[in-house]
Image (cartoon, helix red, strand yellow):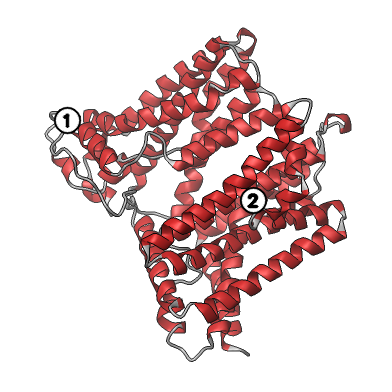
Amino acid sequence: MNALLFLTVKKAKNRIKEMLHRPSELIIGVIFIALLVMNLLTAGQGSMEYTRRAIDEFYAIVFAVYALVFLLSAKTGFVNGASMFSMADVNLLFTAPFKQKRLLSYGLLSQFGRSLMIGVFLVYQYPLLHDTYGIEFWQLLVCLAGYGITVFLSQMLAMLIYSVTASDDKKCRIGKFIFYGISAAFFVYLGLTAYNMKGELLPAVVAASGKFMMNFFPIAGFVKLGVVGLISGNRMHFAIGLLCVAVFVLLYYILVSVINADYYEDVLKATEVSFSAITARKEGKVAENAPRKVKVGKIGLPGGEGASAIAAKHKVENRRSRVFLLDMTSVIMALVTIGFTFIMKESVGGFAFSIYISLFVVATGRWAKELLLPYVYLIPEKPFKKLLYMLRESIGPFVAEAVITFVPFIFLVGCSLPEVLGMIAAKVSFSVLFVGVNLILQRFFGNGGNKALVIMLYFLLGILFSVPSAAVLIALMPFGFVSFFAAAVVNAVLSLLVLFSSRNVLEYAEYNNK
């Protein structure tokens, strides 16, 4: 058997054996499978055929998801690339007598498997998609495969961009201009096409996204063309999409194996950066989002004494890191919520969707990094007081994200100002509550324990602590904006209780850093 094929098969077998010998991972796997089966069994119950929306809307959503994945993945090529190999591959395979094209094929195959696993969360949206658009399970699996292909090709492009621009700032600027210029041109075309169409905005945007020109959008366009062609039974579109994927992979082979003589060095550098980031996450460390060149500016703390010095320190760190009030993840989640509300035309549904995704992506802030450093433990203040000042830095981004998320609801679904203010208050309270859940897990597990099990407990506790405010929100829904403020009050009380229960998290530095 070919050595690389043997290695691929052996790694898959060892991964299965490893999971079987780890009860926590086995339990989590059983839970995920049980949830999947439950989704499959509950899909379609209580749904009516006439309530389903136009399938073109679903195709537009598929294109939007693929385009977002492409932009986020490919742009990393201007920073540190996206390696298809692990450090073990670099240390062992790169020194072995393999041809470069075979080694590249092994990396592409391994990367495709990882890319496909990233989109597994799409499967759990099957009941919603089935009831709303009539999507069958096999069609959702096709969309999942398209998602994996999009991630896969985008990371290939990121590695190619990194290889060309890493050693030259001028090339990097030119590459960014071309990359963002092409992307912006397609979105301008989409906006102008929708604007020139008569009628409501949503049908116009959906129709514009289905124009043939949008299929030329890099990677996302032709992958979406192939996926939609297979789902709708259009063999020609499926064949064109598949052909475009094959041509892209072939061109990639040519460029990295013929034109770029420093391919191995570029891969080594990108792999080293990725390995360092993965190691830091495993050790519970928080990577610093700082540019290569940092302007120090003013020195010293802008005020702060005792425990309040922690908040002042965070303010200086954010300024020197050039971190805006909102990070890219928060902006994307706000835009996704706005897009969901724009399609569904329901304010309450948009609010619920925003809380749902907050459970997955709520920012931990700088407090998580402070727990790994010795300085905060040495401040002669009460632990609970220091904890509150540590969390102070997260409040501003929570409020800003809520504002940019729900203010557009006034124009999209006609919400009143009191309703928007209530949604903002409730959204911030949920975010604080989820941070409190993180602190509880930090209090009892520190940085030890099985990470997958801790994540599962986080989701369970997050849902459990959200039940009281959700019940109040539903019960008081006839009273309009009052229900949101009532839910915010309930969450505020729960958040204080959760934070108070974790007040001693700063008393045991050794436990938090184990």
Residue sitting at x 45%, y 69%:
163
User: In the rendered image of this protein, does residue 10 appear above or below residue 67?
Assistant: below
Near mark 1 (Cα within 10 A), the count class, few <14, some 14-19 or many ≥20, is few
Q: Position of residue 124 (x, y in %)?
A: 67, 46
In terms of secondary structure, where does tag 2 sit? Answer: helix
Residue sitting at x 50%, y 27%:
404
In terms of secondary structure, where does tag 1 sit? Answer: loop
Location of the N terminus by quadrant is: bottom right
Left or right of residue 513: residue 59: right
Residue 87 in view in this figure: yes
User: In the rendered image of this protein, does residue 448 appear above or below residue 205?
Assistant: below
Splitting the image into 4 quarters, where does residue 268 fall?
Answer: bottom left
- Is 115 in front, or is 180? 180
Near mark 2 (Cα within 10 A), the count class, few <14, some 14-19 or many ≥20, is many
Q: Which mark is residue 302?
A: 1
- Is 501 in front, or is 488? 488
Q: Looking at the picture, which amino acid does disc 2 mark?
A: Tyr
Left or right of residue 435: residue 67: right
Q: Looking at the picture, which amino acid does disc 1 mark?
A: Pro
User: In the rendered image of this protein, does residue 131 appear above or below residue 235?
Assistant: above
Q: Which residue is mark 2?
A: 66
Splitting the image into 4 quarters, where does residue 2 fall?
Answer: bottom right
Location of the C terminus by quadrant is: bottom left
Q: Position of residue 351 (x, y in %)?
A: 58, 26
